Structures are given as C-alpha cells and as structure tokens.
Image: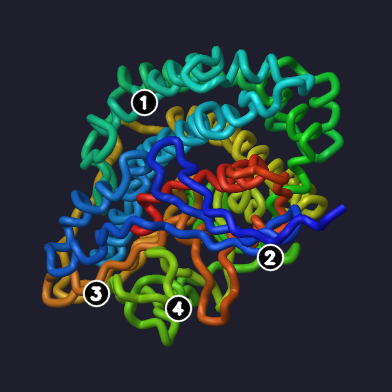
Amino acid sequence: MSETPNRRLIVGPFNRVEGDLEVRLEISGTTVSSAYVNSPLFRGFERILEGRDPMDALVVAPRICGICSVSQSHAAALALAGVMGLEVPRNGLLATNLMTATENVADHLTHFHLFFMPDFARPAYQGRPWFEKAEARFKAAQGIAVRSATAARAELFHVLGILGGKWPHTLTLQPGGVTRAVDARDRVRLLATVRSFRRFLEDSLFGAPLDRVLALAGPEDLERWRISGPAGDFRLFLEIADDLELAALGRAYGRFLSHGAYGDPEGGHLYRRGTFADGQDGPFDPDRVAEHHRFSRMAGQDRPHPPFSGSTVPDGMDEAGYSWCKAPRLDGLPYETGAIARQLVDGHPLIRALAVRDGGSVRSRVIARLLELARTTDAMEGWLRAIEPSAPWCAASEMPDSAQAVGLTEAARGALGHWLRVERGKIASYQIIAPTTWNFSPRDLDGVPGPLEQALVGAPVAEGERTPLSVQHIVRSFDPCMVCTVH
C-alpha cells in the first residue's frame, strides 16, 4: 500500500454570516501538520478614529460589527469613562449588563442553531444513528430547531428595543451609564420577555429546567445526561460529540483569558477577570498585552506593539505576512478566549474538569457556550429585579485634554479591549483587540502559531476531502467573527 503524499489545501469560506476567512493546511498523510489562518479583509477602523472627537468612538466603533455592536459600544464607553474618571451608577450598570447579555446570549443561541449544528445535517453523516434527528432539527433554513430558535431570538431582542431603542448600533450606552431609564411597567415587560426566552431554552434546547443545567458539576453528570437525560438538543449534541469523538478534536495551548463579564454593583464581575493557564489561575494585566506584526501585513514587524503605543499601518506589499490580523500575546504567549475561557477563569467545576481531561476541545467549547447561555439567562432575571427605577441611571463629566484608558469587556466570542489615548482633546490613538484577533491570530515574532492554527494541528483529513469536516468543526467551535478580527 502506497503512503498518502503530503499536500496542501486552501479551505474557506467558513462563516455563515460573512466569509472573510481562509485557512491554508499543510497535510502529512491523513492529518494536518500545520495551519495558516488568513483574515483577508482589512477595514481600518482604528485609523478612521484617529484625530476625531473622543465621543465619536460611541458612533464609529459599533459599526465594526452588526452582530456584536453592543459589545463594541460597551468597550468604547468603558474607555471613555476611564479617561473622564466616571463611575457608573448602579442602575446604569444593571442596564448595561442586560444589554450586553442580551446580545451575547443571542449570539450563543445563533451559533449553536445556525452556524455549528447544521454541519451534522450534511449528507456526509447519513447513516449515523443520530443523523435523521439532526437533519430534521438543524438542516440549514429548514430545521425545526433552526426556525424556533430564530423566533426566540427575535423575541429576546425586545430587551434591546426597550433599553436601547434599536439594535444594532444603539447610542443608549454612554461613558456614565445609560440614557434610557426603566420604569416599573418597562421592568414587567422585560421580565416577561426574559422568562419567555427561559421557557424556550427549557422546552427546546435543554428539555429541562435551567436549574438542572446549572447544577451540572462534573463529566459524570454529562454522561448521565447523554445516556438518559431529557430529550432536548443539548442531549442530541452530547450524543453526536460522543459518536464523533469531538472531545479529542481541536485542542490548542491550554491557556485562556477573560476580561471579566457583567459588572457587579458590589464590585467584581459575574464571570471573573483573569487567566487560566496550565491548570493554574492567574491575573490579567492589560499592560502585559502586545501585538506582533511579523506575519501580519502591517508595518512595524520587528517588535511587539503595546496597544497604547501601537500602530495600524497596512502594508499591502508585505510578502512575509499572510493575514491582515495582528497577533496579540499576553506575556509573549498566545491565549484562547471565549465562553470556555470565561467559565474556566470563573472556576466552574464542570468546565474545569473537562479542561483537565480534554483541554479546549470542540466538545468543551460548545458545552461551555451552552452552560453560559443558561447561567447568563438566569442572571438577567436577577438584574431586572435589582433595578430601582427612581435611582440615577447616568453620570456626567468633562472630557480631559489629555488622558489614556482601556475599556475591557467580554463579547460573546471572548475578550474585547479598546485602548484609547487622548491628546489635545482629540483621539491620538485607538487600538482594538477583538476576541477573534486573539483566537485567529497568525504566527508571532517567534513563529509561534495562534490558537486556531495550533488547534488544527492533528485534525484528521480523509483522502480526497477538499473541505475536511474535522477542520470545519474546529473552526466553528471558536465561533469566528471575521469583520471584528481586523476591524
């Protein structure tokens, strides 16, 4: 029998929203030996913001993305609050949590139903014991679960209609809080909307009360759910993941970071800020972040770029660079971010146990995302009950002539940071590191691959496969948003 020759594949597009992602695979025999992730679209929002009035960031930055625009608004507002020395009142913080959570929860729901699960309804999986159910529920544009999730998502967005006036690109989020106060009648409507969404999750996605999902504490609980749990789409995913061994697919470095999500009025976050690397907790210090341009099509390839002194000068003639995405590193190392990072940093026992056993696998990422969907939905009801309609909603202050600050938040896909520097009353520098910039980064100055590039190494590729299914599952487990990647 002759050996399978080494070969190269160019794979893409992947995203079912927009397709600006290309992956070059070097294949040795029947597995991926190396991968090069290319974000081929340069947009230049950081350059657009230079020289503008700092408050323009609230209008310009959310246009980076029509999917996670509230997260971009929040990061911009936090950076502006930092330079203005503002402290957001309790109601403003709760309303901000509700708006960012609505967008993030909707993104998790959309990813599972419209982006990730439809891959298992493909004819390539015909004959698997779960295929008919997966096809009936998740076939693109036709599946029962796809249609019901889309309707539930649309209803949930009434939260953003009430609190934000519109979605995307609301201007309700401000450095000092929110401009829209909620009265008692609004709160009743909002609670009814969130409870309706909770019922959808309990009836369709999990097939059980959220309290039962929140009680999952270890792999043995998941195994019992897979074998004899309620007949929801969560159990279907567990069956598919077990059959296809998705727990053994897509592991990167075992290093994760979170900026902390959903501020607590008493201090801290619902999901903690920090790192989880090699099984150990650690702090997250934004001053220890730098971006590498060695394999990005950017000027300044000979040194790391701390964001406050960073640059975004495109070099279309660069032959060494293979992506417009920069390579962010923390203490010189690549880190993964996303729902799995938030839950690991927060110390959730189930996700930590999975990380110890399987690492950041395809299965672990999806389970973390669904668990977070349940946890955040549950928290939203608590935030609504905590609102005091007669209390302040927004603080105000003057813009200083010169200052700098970083706005750190968590979008659905992970850690989002806006580094703002103001000089002479104008934006002197605005640097953004988005979640997909972390996860889909190219190699750095030392030639070390980014998290997705590393996660693809070892992926099986069948002879004759032009778009390997294993590669698609790994890429989609990170939930790419490529317009944010190169903003």
The type of residue carrying mark 1 is Phe
For marks 2 and 3 on the same chain, the one whose residue lies earlier in the sequence: 2
How many marks the image carries: the answer is 4
| Cα–Cα span, label 4 and label 1 | 41 Å
Q: Residues within 10 Å of mark 1 (few under 14, many from 20)?
A: many
Q: In this view, does 264 lie above or below 458?
A: above
The type of residue carrying mark 3 is Ala
Numbered tag placed on residue 294 in the rendering: 4
Which residue is under mark 1?
157
For marks 2 and 4 on the same chain, the one whose residue lies earlier in the sequence: 2
For marks 3 and 4 on the same chain, the one whose residue lies earlier in the sequence: 4
Contact between marks 4 and 1 (CB within 8 A): the answer is no
For marks 1 and 3 on the same chain, the one whose residue lies earlier in the sequence: 1
Contact between marks 3 and 4 (CB within 8 A): the answer is no
The type of residue carrying mark 4 is Arg
Can you tell which quarter of the image residue 24 is in? Answer: bottom right
Q: Which residue is drawn at 24% across and 39% down?
A: 170
Which residue is under mark 3?
403
Contact between marks 2 and 3 (CB within 8 A): the answer is no
Q: Which residue is drawn at 20% across and 52% down?
A: 60
The type of residue carrying mark 2 is Ala
| Cα–Cα span, label 2 and label 3 | 33 Å
